[in-house]
Image (cartoon, helix red, strand yellow):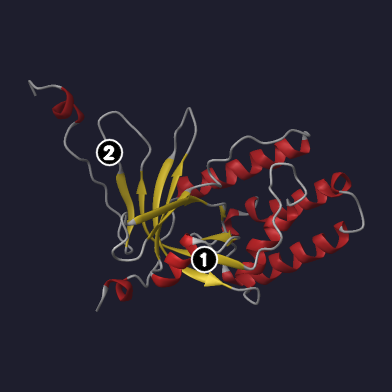
Amino acid sequence: MNLLQKLVRPVDLPQEFLEWQCEERRSLFDTLVQGRCPRFMASHLPVLSSLNEPGAPFPIRSSTKGVGLLPRPEFLLEHVQEIHATLVRCREISSHESLNERIGTARSLYERPERIDPGTLGSIEIFRGQTYHNLCRDPRATLLFTGSAPRYLSFQVNCTVEILGLEDLRFQFIRGMRFLFEPEQFHIRQPDYPLGYLFRVQEVFEKTPRMGRAGKNVGQYGKREEYDREDWRARTDPTV
């Protein structure tokens, strides 16, 4: 059995990660309602690392991607239909007039965390550049989320990636959520969004910086275990 055949059972994202995602989205919605432009949203914009082809001068390709949560399969169609209906209604009115309705539709997932699929994340592929070609060849990827002060919540999420087309309900949800906020000034509009990524979570490492601890493995092939590297003092105090 090769490595990719072993990566078939996603693990769940930790509760702390899911709560952080929901909190940040609710904060974004509140900021928009108040008429303010949001600042950089670390929980939404991880660094995605993929593997370059064998023989490349450097083995890793990194890029920043907008990434979000998805509904569980049993709720997916309902949310896709709600998003579609909202977008149709909002075509007839200005973006300012439609803001509350668009936010309400987006909130409908983040205010009901029991509907969130804890084993997947989603993103849009816009340019079909080197990252896309890498993932077509080798579906392994790492998402590195690095939060802001004062908590500095950080997670490394190792995934296998499925490329989604327009006929896929999961991509219709991902794409629809993007369209809900397409009029807002924090987005750079693009001609189209033809493809999406579904990230199936395989490993999660909590990377939040703490005194004397490198991190902990909070999900690997269905297992949960903690680890600590050598004591922090041993790297800084030659007398220890």
Circle 1: residue type? Leu
Circle 2: residue type? Ala
In the rendered image, residue 27, in percent from the top left (x then y), is placed at 65, 38
Q: Which residue is painted at 74% across and 42% down in the image?
A: 185
Q: Which residue is painted at 17% across and 24% down in the image?
A: 236
- What numbered label is drawn on residue 10? none
Q: Quadrant of the C terminus?
A: top left
Q: Quadrant of the N terminus?
A: bottom left
* Separation of residues labelled 2 and 1 (CA atoms): 29 Å
Q: Secondary structure at mark 1?
A: strand
Tell me: 12 left or right of 223. right
> Which sits in the foreground, 186 or 223?
186
Vertical relation: 42 (above or below) 85: above
Q: Mark 1 — residue? A: 198
Q: Mark 2 — residue? A: 214
Q: Residues within 10 Å of mark 1 (few under 14, many from 20)?
A: many
In the rendered image, residue 155, in percent from the top left (x then y), is placed at 41, 46
